[in-house]
Image: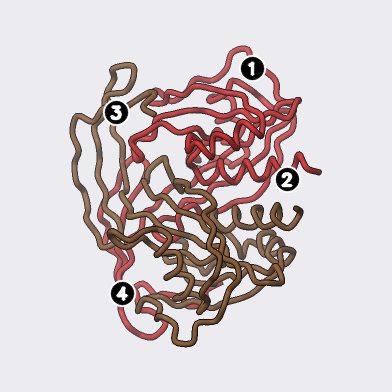
Chain colours: A brown, B red
């Protein structure tokens, strides 16, 4: 879909990091005027809603430097180059929670910040969890703690702003609909 | 909450744009090792779920340069400096849809991309909409088209990936729960 397309007339690379890169595009707007767009490129990510057999959700707490605080989220992680999102989802679930799953269901994908970034998250639900004896390690710069909470407890964490993250907010509503079926 | 805090030992400014700024922080991890964090600072935003008296949701279609495609979203916009989120919400609703509202309810706030950005969106539901005769203009680089859809139509747009945005995905689940009450 290209409605209101903005054509690039120049693209200025600003930064190439290990995770993100940044550029400023000069564009022609639909009315013929020129403007600039500041854009962050990101490899994309997966997030997983891990649901236990008794309907609890598994969450991870971690420090988020961008926010300068720790928040509680569903497990998630960046896509590796050439890796299928489903493979990333299984790997991140294992690394962050120590669980594998017999049932992994794709829910949907969404852009997290379309106003300035191209990051897309592919969201999955993981059920029929089992403990992996010799689990894969976290990345060396990742520190997380785990918790297993009921839907009511998760909703309380939203009110207390311990849960403060779009994909996790979505996950809680998704679980609420799932459990009301 | 500062669990697993990462202490900054140096912060390198990379870019200061009109919307975002970018920096790279050298940090000390909880285990004493050093690492780098690439961080995007953003002023934050509001998003509004506009609900008509007959339970439809108003959506806006716009081109998102970061994604190089147009997507359909709930109305949203950046916070102006010093502006209360509720004021931004009323302004953006008016600019993007031409509607005012008699009832504006705060739902929750969430970070959109906590892995690399500090953007936080404050989400509101707008009801009892009324047409504003002499509405405020869009920003000069904004082009949007409007649509009013039922929940079922919105869900179909998710399946067709016309809706491809975290805050709008959340909004649809929120409306589904609202309408199932």
How far is disc 1 from disc 2 in space, using C-alphas? 29 Å
User: x and y percent of residue B62 in the render?
Assistant: 44, 29
Q: How many marks?
A: 4
Pointer 3 residue: A35
Q: Residues within 10 Å of mark 3 (few under 14, many from 20)?
A: some
In the rendered image, residues at marks 3 and 1 fall on the same chain: no
The chain to which mark 1 is attached is B
Q: Earlier in the sequence, mark 1 or mark 4?
A: 4
Q: Quadrant of the N terminus of chain B?
A: bottom right
The chain to which mark 3 is attached is A
Pointer 4 residue: B35
Q: Nearer the viewer, mark 1 or mark 2?
A: 2
Q: Residues within 10 Å of mark 1 (few under 14, many from 20)?
A: some
C-beta proximity under 8 Å, tags 1 and 2? no
Q: Which mark is residue B106?
A: none
C-beta proximity under 8 Å, tags 1 and 4? no
In the rendered image, residues at marks 2 and 3 fall on the same chain: no
How far is disc 3 from disc 4 in space, using C-alphas? 36 Å
In the rendered image, residues at marks 3 and 4 fall on the same chain: no
How far is disc 2 from disc 4 in space, using C-alphas? 42 Å
User: x and y percent of residue A110 in the render?
Assistant: 47, 46
In the rendered image, residues at marks 1 and 4 fall on the same chain: yes
The chain to which mark 4 is attached is B
Most foreground residue, A122 or A29: A122
Q: Residue at x 73, y 58 (%)?
A: A179
Most foreground residue, A85 or A11: A85
* A156 up-or-down from A33: above or below: below
Pointer 1 residue: B132
């Amino acid at each position: 879909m290209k409605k209101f397309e903005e054509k690039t007339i120049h693209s200025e690379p600003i930064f190439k990091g290990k995770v993100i890169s940044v550029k400023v595009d000069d564009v022609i707007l639909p009315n013929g005027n020129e403007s600039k767009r500041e854009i962050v490129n990101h490899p994309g990510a997966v997030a997983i809603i891990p649901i236990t057999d008794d309907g609890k959700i598994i969450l991870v707490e971690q420090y988020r430097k961008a926010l300068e605080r720790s928040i509680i989220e569903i497990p998630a992680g960046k896509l590796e180059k050439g890796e299928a999102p489903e493979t990333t989802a299984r790997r991140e679930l294992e690394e962050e929670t120590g669980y594998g799953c017999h049932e992994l269901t794709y829910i949907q994908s969404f852009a997290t910040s379309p106003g300035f970034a191209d990051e897309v998250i592919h969201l999955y639900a993981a059920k029929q969890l089992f403990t992996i004896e010799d689990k894969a390690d976290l990345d060396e710069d990742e520190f997380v703690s785990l918790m297993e909470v009921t839907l009511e407890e998760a909703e309380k964490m939203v009110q207390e702003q311990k849960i403060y993250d779009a994909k996790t907010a979505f996950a809680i509503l998704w679980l609420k609909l799932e459990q009301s079926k």
